[in-house]
Amino acid sequence: MSNINDKKIKLVELEPSVLLELAKLRHLRSNDSESLSLATEALEIANRCSYVLQQADIHLFLGEYYRDTGDLVQAKKHAELAKLRSYQMIDVETGDYVTKDEGTKWKYKPCYDKAVKLLKELER
């Protein structure tokens, strides 16, 4: 899916979001193998580029995807990662994840709230 022209004009930061939206669309159309492939590619790019907020969105989608396909173990794993990434940052000097206090007001609240809701749903 990667396009060499995107990298030439420095738009690689858009690629994970575009791939994620395509994955969501494929999932809605029940093309789950393509959906999973697109989401996995999006996550690989977001991980490689340290795009923490995009990682959170992708993990949230993967949690919902696995819930919908019946793999509750993977669903919980990705929901927990989405929740965690929603209040993490990257240390620019070391490249390590820095976890802030979960109660902090500095978090990606929409993703955090959805991840918490998904985790509660999976607990039932």
Image (cartoon, rainbow, N blue to C red):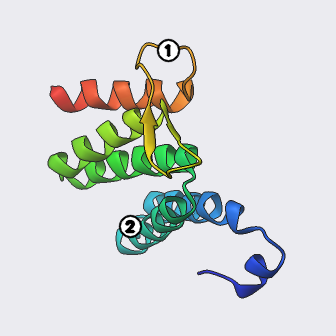
Label number found at residue 104: 1
Check the image and report above or below for 12 versus 104: below
As drawn, the residue found furthest toward the right would be 9
Label number found at residue 32: none
- The local secondary structure at tag 1 comes to loop
Residue visible at 29% across and 49% down in the picture? 68
Residue visible at 39% across and 32% down in the picture? 115
How far from the left and from the top, in percent, is residue 85? 44, 39
| Disc 2 residue type (three-letter) | Leu
Q: Residues within 10 Å of mark 2 (few under 14, many from 20)?
A: many
Residue visible at 59% across and 81% down in the picture? 1
Q: Residues within 10 Å of mark 1 (few under 14, many from 20)?
A: few
Q: CA distance from mark 1 to mark 2?
A: 32 Å
Tell which of 59 and 124 is nearer to you. 59
Q: How many marks?
A: 2
| Disc 1 residue type (three-letter) | Thr
Label number found at residue 36: 2
Tell which of 48 and 34 is nearer to you. 48
Q: In the rendered image, which quarter is residue 3 located in?
A: bottom right
Residue visible at 33% across and 31% down in the picture? 118
Check the image and report above or below for 16 versus 90: below
How far from the left and from the top, in percent, is residue 96? 44, 48
